[in-house]
Amino acid sequence: MITIEKARETIVSRITPLPSEKIPLEQALGRYLAEDIVSQMDIPSWNNSAMDGYAVRVTDIPHAGVRLGIAYEIPAGSLPQGPFPEGSAVKIMTGAPVPPGADAVVKREDTIESEGAVIVNIVPKKSDHIRFAGEDIAKGDLILQKGTLLEAAHIGLLASLRRVMVLCSQRPTVAIIATGNEVADLDEELTENKIPSSNSSTLTSLVRQLGAIPLYLGIARDTKAGLRDKFEQASRADLILTSGGVSMGDYDVVRDVMTEGANSVEFWQVRMKPGKPLAFGIINGIPAIGLPGNPVSTMTSFDQFARPAILKFMGAQTLTLPRLKARLLEAVRGPGDRPHYLRGVLKRCGDELCVASTGPQGSGILSSMARGNCYMIVPEGHRILEQGDLIECEVFHASW
Ligand code: AMP
Ligand code: MG
């Protein structure tokens, strides 16, 4: 049985990042950048005022109380009319360009304006309240690196640079096949011998959440022919995910089909709890991950193995979940011979992070995934970690 790390390495080594495509900026949220972005301009492009107030020359104001005539006004969106005479000021609004000759802005709160003149009640320093050209981004700066996940701020930066089109990695199509004679999709009648196919919904959602394209192919009944038929329908996918049918049972046929013809099984079973029965192989030339059927195992194994594969297709820089150390609020146990991925609730306790289990940890207890926000990992070689010990956690829910 191989380790989680070795299993992940093997899977990721069989994935080739997809080519890139140019897409409109407004469609780029959640996509991975496939080019380095170097600024062709200074941002801001010109010195501008950080305040509503008056543009001045500091040499004109040696002491508080100086009275300056107002030469003209620059609302935001207007350009300076030109130089202004010594001993005068220019009324300026936030964001408007600083007029030539001015070396500071005095904010309105520090002045009194009357009859076309302004009394300055402070002594300004050079550069006060001026936002200088290029202070956010200078021309030639490398601003965003290839492999960056584009979020709102990145999209805004690209808009500042007037990038209408942006090069992103293509999104992989991920075929999803549920297996089992006992599972029913939402459009099927739930007869008394059936359970809902929750894995169909969790897997479709997990794939979509990563920005990939789910291709749900329905339920294969527990026969080789049924499964073969689904694999045929997956021919245009970049990756195939199955759930269930990969254990020791008489009707667990996923591995059987993985060994037929030119197909191959690269490994079966991983040293982890939950999620031990996992198969990885190549089916009709497509990488295929046979995820275990128990709903928690399906999700845990997805996060450990399918997620990195999907992210590698998309050219992401980091493939694994973020890890944090947190103080245990209760003792937790592991099997000893393999790491235990318990579901936990991570939160702040004073000035450190702490974590508690979500409660019952059976691999069928899907509500533990819904209640939790992280995996708490009892490492291999440990049967117990005590309350107060530090434990490694992998965060799977962003809003903790
Ligand atoms: P299996 O490995 O196929 O024996 O499945 C292990 C357990 O997971 C069984 O209790 C199944 O009923 C359950 N299971 C399998 N597929 C699904 C699914 N699509 N949705 C929910 N539970 C499932
Ligand atoms: Mg089954």
Image (cartoon, grey):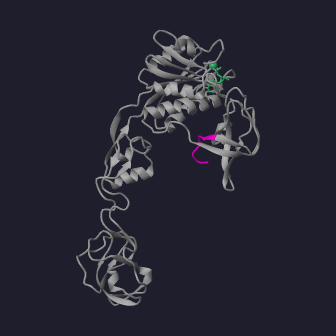
Quadrant of res 303: top right
Q: Does residue 349 lie above or below 128 as drawn?
A: above
Q: Is residue 392 left or right of residue 148?
A: right
Which residue sits at x=53%, y=13%?
Answer: 257
Main secondary structure of the magenta stretch: loop
Q: Is residue 78 left or right of residue 311?
A: left
Q: Does residue 150 lie above or below 103 as drawn?
A: above
Count of number-bearing discs = 0
Q: Is residue 14 left or right of residue 270?
A: left
Which residue sits at x=60%, y=26%?
Answer: 3
Q: Does residue 313 lie above or below 158 as drawn?
A: above
Q: Is residue 373 left or right of residue 135?
A: right
The residue segment tinted magenta is 393-400
Asked if the magenta segment contains residue 397, the reply would be: yes
How far across and down, in percent of the image, does residue 294 sit?
65, 26
As drawn, which residue projects farthest toward the left? 82
How far across and down, in percent of the image, does residue 126 sit?
37, 76
Residue 186 visible at all:
no
Asked if the magenta segment contains residue 258, the reply would be: no
Which residue sits at x=62%, y=21%?
Answer: 277
Residue 234 visible at all:
yes
How far across and down, in percent of the image, does residue 393 sit?
64, 41
Quadrant of res 23: top left
Q: Nearer the viewer, residue 241 or 120?
A: 120
